[in-house]
């Protein structure tokens, strides 16, 4: 085994890869990181890289995204450092006692918020319905779209930096906005009167639009645990015609429930940038693998309905962050974490997991 690099950036795609190289060179020129730093920027996941390079040993610090699996062998010995280049850290949070882990806390705030508004306008505006009608210029048999006014209530679940920006855009577009967050007391001190907080129960019942902007937490004994938070039973209590938009993690709102409620007419519009078990879902689509998982099957059906425009459903392949400015910002924030790591004597980061308390 040999160590050929000081840091490897895995899953670096498209413009992000170029920006990572440019930001690294700029930091070297400014003397913020070693000028002889050996770095590698590649599109492969960790497991793909190690399969292709069986003799390679991973360096003390790496950066990756959600599809990389951290090898158990990497976590033995000296404490390693990991930068996850996303805002969500559910894929790695259980390793917080074994490694120094940090994420991009300012991750693509505006691009994800604007993607949310794209979904709001598509669902409220019945975009698929109107686009199909344009083929024959049908005007008589056209449904009315939902106008965005102060009479309509939009709730943001999870008002961190992304959620707070979504909240601002909802208000700017004329909606009455409200928020739900388990950190309500802490956030009241931060946001003051600019954000109106309500309970989960109230929000489910009075919302015309619900937006999930929560980080996924998989640790069962955490107060932030939220797998299946938007269960079918919970959303069934919502207003008829409710619009549901998910831009963080599919596991928070499983697709089987969303599909059932849409088919029953309880949910009137869906916008999804994310899916449950995304790696499995993408593999099932690419390889046409059969599956018995009800959420993967429902996700595929939602995708088909979006593609053929037969429903008020809109999907993306987890690309809410993929704006021109966001790609540059992600690389910049990643390199800033690298700089922090060197300042800390390679022993960790200024800000790292756990960000919040674990126990319930």
Image (tube, rainbow, N blue to C red):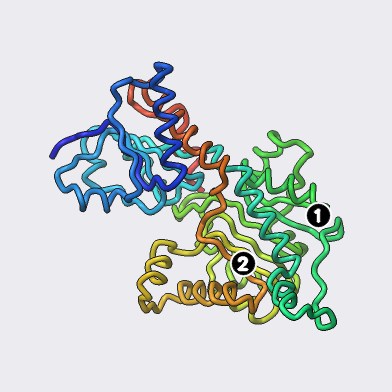
Q: Are marks 2 and 1 in contact (CB under 8 Å)?
A: no
What residue sits right under mark 1 in the picture?
175
Q: Residues within 10 Å of mark 1 (few under 14, many from 20)?
A: many
Front one among 188 and 255: 255
Q: Which mark is residue 140?
A: none
Residue 348 in the image: x percent, y percent?
Answer: 37, 29
Of badges 2 and 1, the one in the foreground is 2
Camera-side residue: 45 or 212? 45
- N-term-proximal mark, 2 vs 1: 1
Q: Is residue 122 above or below residue 59?
A: below
Give the residue at x 71% y 50%. 179
Residue 353 falls in image quadrant? top left
Using the image, determine if residue 160 lies above or below residue 7.
Answer: below
Which residue occupies 50% across, 63% down? 275
Query: Circle 2 is placed at which residue position?
Result: 314
Question: What is the x, y in percent for residue 34?
Answer: 33, 20
């Amino acid at each position: 085994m040999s160590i050929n690099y000081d840091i490897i950036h895995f899953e670096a795609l498209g413009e992000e890869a170029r920006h990572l190289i440019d930001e690294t060179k700029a930091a070297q020129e400014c003397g913020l990181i070693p000028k002889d730093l050996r770095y590698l920027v590649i599109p492969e996941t960790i497991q793909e890289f190690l399969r292709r390079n069986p003799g390679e040993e991973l360096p003390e610090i790496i950066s990756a995204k959600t599809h990389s699996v951290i090898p158990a062998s990497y976590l033995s010995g000296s404490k390693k450092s990991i930068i996850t280049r996303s805002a969500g850290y559910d894929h790695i949070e259980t390793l917080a006692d074994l490694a120094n882990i940090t994420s991009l806390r300012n991750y693509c705030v505006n691009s994800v918020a604007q993607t949310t508004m794209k979904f709001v306008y598509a669902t409220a505006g019945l975009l698929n319905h109107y686009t199909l009608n344009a083929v024959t210029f049908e005007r008589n048999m056209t449904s009315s779209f939902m106008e965005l006014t102060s009479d309509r209530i939009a709730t943001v679940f999870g008002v961190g930096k992304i959620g707070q920006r979504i909240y601002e855009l909802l208000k700017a577009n004329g909606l009455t906005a409200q928020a739900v967050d388990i950190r309500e007391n802490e956030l009241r001190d931060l946001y003051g009167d600019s954000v109106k907080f309500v309970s989960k129960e109230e929000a489910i019942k009075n919302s015309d639009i619900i937006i999930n902007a929560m980080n996924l937490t998989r640790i069962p004994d955490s107060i932030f645990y939220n797998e299946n938070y938007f269960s079918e039973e919970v959303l069934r209590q919502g207003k008829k015609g409710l619009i549901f938009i998910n831009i963080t993690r599919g596991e928070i709102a499983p697709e089987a429930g969303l599909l059932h409620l849409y088919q029953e007419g309880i949910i009137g519009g869906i916008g999804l940038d994310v899916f449950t078990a995304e790696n499995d879902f993408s593999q099932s689509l690419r390889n046409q693998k059969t599956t018995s998982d009800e959420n993967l099957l429902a996700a595929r059906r939602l995708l088909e309905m979006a593609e053929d425009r037969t429903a008020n459903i809109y999907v993306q392949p987890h690309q809410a962050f993929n704006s021109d400015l966001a790609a540059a910002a992600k690389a910049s924030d990643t390199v800033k974490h690298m700089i922090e790591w060197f300042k800390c004597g390679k022993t960790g980061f200024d800000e790292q997991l756990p960000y919040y308390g674990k126990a319930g």
